[in-house]
Every structure is written in C-alpha cells, then in structure tokens.
Image: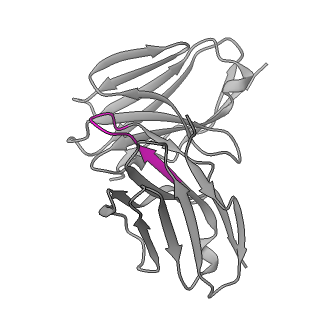
Amino acid sequence: QKEVEQNSGPLSVPEGAIASLNCTYSDRGSQSFFWYRQYSGKSPELIMSIYSNGDKEDGRFTAQLNKASQYVSLLIRDSQPSDSATYLCAVNPTNRLAFGKGNQVVVIP
Amino acid sequence: KAGVTQTPRYLIKTRGQQVTLSCSPISGHRSVSWYQQTPGQGLQFLFEYFSETQRNKGNFPGRFSGRQFSNSRSEMNVSTLELGDSALYLCASTGPGTNTEAFFGQGTRLTVV
C-alpha cells in the first residue's frame, strides 16, 4: 500500500467551476497534511496545511481532513486559468514528507 | 524574508562523476530535507537534517549522502553518477516548533549524460 495515493487522472474544469482533488494516506499516526501546487518546470509551492479534522478555508481553497477515513481533499472554488498546475498531496509521518504522485488540473477558459 | 536558496540551478554531469548540491534554508529554519523528483517516481524523500544531525533517511543507495553545517546550510552529494540520477533535486526547510510546514527551494536540475 502506498503511503499517499492520489488516484484521479488529469482533471479538466471550466473556468469558474469547482475543482475537487482527493488523497488517501496509510499511516494512521500522521498528524500534518499539506497540499502543494507545482507549475510545470517549477518547484512545489505550499498552498494549504491542515492538522485537525474538518475543513480549513483560505481564499478560494478549502482543505478537508478526515483522520478516521485517512482522507484529505482540496477544493478550488471559482477556478481560474492560473490554477492550471499539478497538485501534490503530502503527509508528514516523521521528519519527512511523503507525497502522492499528484493530480494535474487544467482550467479551461 | 529570503526563501530557500539552492545552487546551482542546472548541472550537466557525465556518468561516473560526482556532484555536490547546496541549499540555504530560510533564516531561522533548522530543519532541511532533500527530495528527488522524476517523472516516473514523483517526489521521493532522500534525507532530513536538523542541527547538523541526520534524523531520517529515505531508501536511496549509499551514493547519496548529505550533511548540514552549523549555520543550517546543507549539501548533498551524489557519487558515481548514473543516468538514472537525472532528476530535479529539491531542498525544503521547515521552521521551529510544532509548525511542520516545509518550503521548497527552486531546485537543481541535474542531467547525467
């Protein structure tokens, strides 16, 4: 079982729509969860961190965490062409980050 | 506040050579971790240093090594380069306390020919 799984393929969303990304993790002891955005040819940029069950909102982004189900999600509201990127889910088991393979999001104008 | 600085940005090396990459963390950050990113494997953890001590190590061969200096700057070294070592090498720094947010540098793109 992979530590962090992001199974969805590329996601195409119309401009202004909601993009929904999901991630599951295997280590129940994990306490910190992150979403990074990575543009092609660039390094990952931290966009959300979440540490407790429930929702956390920051601008157009909402992260959701369910530790019982070992599930993290990211919602991007009012998607913009500038949101077109790969989104990486990351979990911090112990002094390191374990990453999923990422989901490519394409926002269509 | 300056971000994480990695040097050099690009490197081309020949098989069998060795390479040293450098990372300067955000001021005040004492934890530095290294990752390798390839299209096939994604982002994989190499090692993590805190106060000059390696606290965690990923599943990479011994050709990959690192160290951290007293000013928190870190270096990683890859010896006897192989074609498969071609990748984007990323350094991340994490601040003190319980906040475990990690911030990445621009990366070093290594090409082995």
Q: Is B94 covered by the magenta stretch? A: yes
Q: Which corner quadrant holds the C terminus of chain B?
A: bottom right
- Considering every residue shown, the one lying at the far front of the view is B71
Determine the residue positioned at 25% across, 30% down.
Answer: A67
The count of marks equals 0
Q: Is residue B95 above or below residue B85?
A: above
Which quarter of the picture shows residue A103? top right
Provide residue B105's location: percent of width, then percent of height.
57, 48
Q: Assign the magenta stretch its main secondary structure.
A: loop
* x then y, percent, for residue B16: 62, 88
Q: Residue at x 38, y 68 (%)?
A: B59
Where's the N terminus of chain B, which quadrant? top right
Q: What residue do we see at 70% from left, 44% from top?
A: A40
The quadrant in which residue A102 appears is top right
- Residue B99 located within the stretch drawn in magenta: yes
In the displayed structure, A16 sits above or below A21; it is above
Span highlighted in magenta in the image: B91-100
In-image side of B81 versus B45 (left or right): right
In this view, A109 is above or below A85: above
Residue B69 in which image quadrant: bottom left
